[in-house]
Image (cartoon, rainbow, N blue to C red):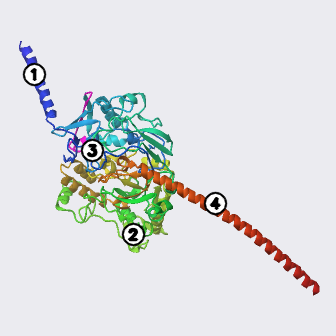
Amino acid sequence: MGLARASFCSFATALVALALMASQVEAAERTHGLSAFNDLAYPPDFAHFTYANPDAPKGGTLSLIGWGGVTTFNSLNNFILKGDAAQGLDLLFDSLMVRAADEPDAVYGLAASSAEVADDGMSVTFTLRPKARFSDGSPITADDVVFSFETLKEKGHPIYHQTLRDVTKAEAIDPQTVRYTFQGDLVRDLPLTVAGLPVLSKAYYTEKPFEETTLDPPLGSGPYLIDDFAQGRTIVYKRNPDYWAKDLPVNKGRWNFDKIRYEYFRDRTAGMEAFKAGTYDFREEFTSKVWATEYDFPAIRDGRVKKEVLPDETPSGTQGFFINTRRDKFKDPRVREALALAFDFEWTNRNMFYGLYERTQSFFENSPMKAEGEPSDAERVLIESLDVEVPEGALEAAVMPPKSDGSGQDRKLLRAAGKLLDEAGWTVENGKRVNGQGEQLSVEFLTFEPTFERILAPYVKNLTQLGIHARIRRVDPAQYQQRLKDFDFDVTTQRYVMRSTPGVELRSYFGSQSADLDGSLNLAGIKDPAVDALIEKVVAAKTREDMTIAARALDRVLRAGHYWVPHWYKGSNTVAYWDKFSRPETKPKYDRGILDTWWFDQAEAAKVEASKTASASTAADETAIADETEADGSRLWLILGGVLLAILGIALYLRGRRKAQT
């Protein structure tokens, strides 16, 4: 009896404990969206995003090069390290929630109708929509979500493993409910992170190897399907007419093109010529010289092609020549600082960029997170509280890139660079900058684009004047990608996309744990405890103000480390497109909005085609006139030739007569 009572009491206690656990989870507020600081702009009953037109017509094709900066592809698997994935594959896959492009970080329900973050922040529970479907009609279930998380973390690109390291598990509570559990103190962004993971079909990948490159179109659940492709040349996506989520508020007025086609070209010149010829519709220009000098062709002059500058309110990103500190010759920050002193941005901007750019100064350029001047009291307190060594200059005025006299070879800056190299043990002997072992300092710039060579050539010349053996190494795109994955380079160009609410991606960009991870984005190989600590402060911030302070402190420490030679930026997107499209009156604040909110305008497209036909007819007429003129000219030359021959004959005859008389 006592044993039975004890057993019952134990069972009752267990039930109470389970009830308490359940009540703690239930106590969390169920919401239609998530944001880092709980500041959602859209109410639960919103009809559509304000930057989308719910009455936008469907149809037509948008063809473009894309924004990836890649020139080939050999795989339709964009979730793994191996291979070069095609652009646009994200169009195939839905996630639990989708980002609102007019808010810094908010996401709203897509495959999930709601989310509940536990009061302690250590878990989030999503409720799936019963009608959510893969493109083959099979339902999206909690098991698929769990499978997606486990597969991406265990077999996906190393970035997934790093990003999800503090997500300990995903579990299916029932077919329509999935819960993620977290660990550690830095969990602020993890609900947003898991909400944005692609949902994969467990049934599909049970039969298909996830971890291999493939050219088999994958099964997804998104608004588009793969229609056709030619490896390395083009890939076409077609809108799925049976897309399950097409009428949800987050999709109203979006995904309007029947087809989206990505074109690939081996170099920018070929791509530009193809655009002029109307081979594809839309182009964002990233080369200032081309923007300044080549966008004056006939189709622009007669209005068939529109040229625009779209405002860009996102952080401009972190672009520069990144120095591989894994290599012994670059471990001394004085060497890296010297390399930066030899690059003359002012001359480059005036002579090559037509003055279109501003100098990048910060890792958080064009955002409130950029550090400026002396550190604020809050920044100073935060840096001093780290209890780790910080780079020299981190607690002084923010490190700025040098400003030259614009001559291309600023002697003052080159002397300063030489002095730093001397101090670092690289001295000049017989015109060569050598170390104590007599080894010459060498710098190889790895690139795959010929357009960058014109920028690098004057830089190489300056480095050569310092006694450095500097050279440019251009390789094909596939080899370039592999060498980056293997960290087989001295210096290369990289641009990191920065979010308005930066989070765990900073670990991939600049964290010590990513420095030696195959395929890591930490190209500079940064291993700095102060950087690591400040990244965690950014990720853990409870308010936007605290996050901004931590980001500015991180910016100061990174800039003081001299890991890069900062490039240039402009707070806008320079685009050109054949005038076949219309768009909403409101542009999303933090995105271009082109792929998902523009639409094909039949009337404008007809005008363009008519103009093309007229231009072709005019060109044909001009060719015919030219041919006729050439024919008339030929006849005239034959007549004149005959006359000249006759005159020459007479002259020779008379000359012969004169000789005979003599």
Mark 4 in CB contact with mark 3 (< 8 angstroms): no
Magenta residues, start to end? 174-194
- Residue 489 on the magenta span: no
Label drawn at residue 346? 2
Depth order, front residue of 245/549: 245
Mark 4 in CB contact with mark 1 (< 8 angstroms): no
Q: Which residue is mark 1?
A: 12
The quarter of the displayed image where residue 119 is located: top left
Callout 4 secondary element: helix
The quarter of the displayed image where residue 252 is located: top left
Q: Amino acid at mark 1?
A: Ala
Q: Residues within 10 Å of mark 3 (few under 14, many from 20)?
A: some
Q: Which residue is mark 4?
A: 624
Q: Which residue is mark 3?
A: 48
Which residue ends up furthest to the bottom in the rendered image? 662
How far apart marks 2 and 3 lie (CA) works out to 46 Å
Q: Which quadrant holds the C terminus?
A: bottom right
Of the residues tagged 2 and 4, which is closer to the observer? 4
Which of the marked residues, 3 or 1, is nearer the chain's N terminus? 1
Which of the marked residues, 1 or 2, is nearer the chain's N terminus? 1
Horizontal and vertical percent position of residue 572: 35, 59
Q: Which quadrant holds the N terminus?
A: top left
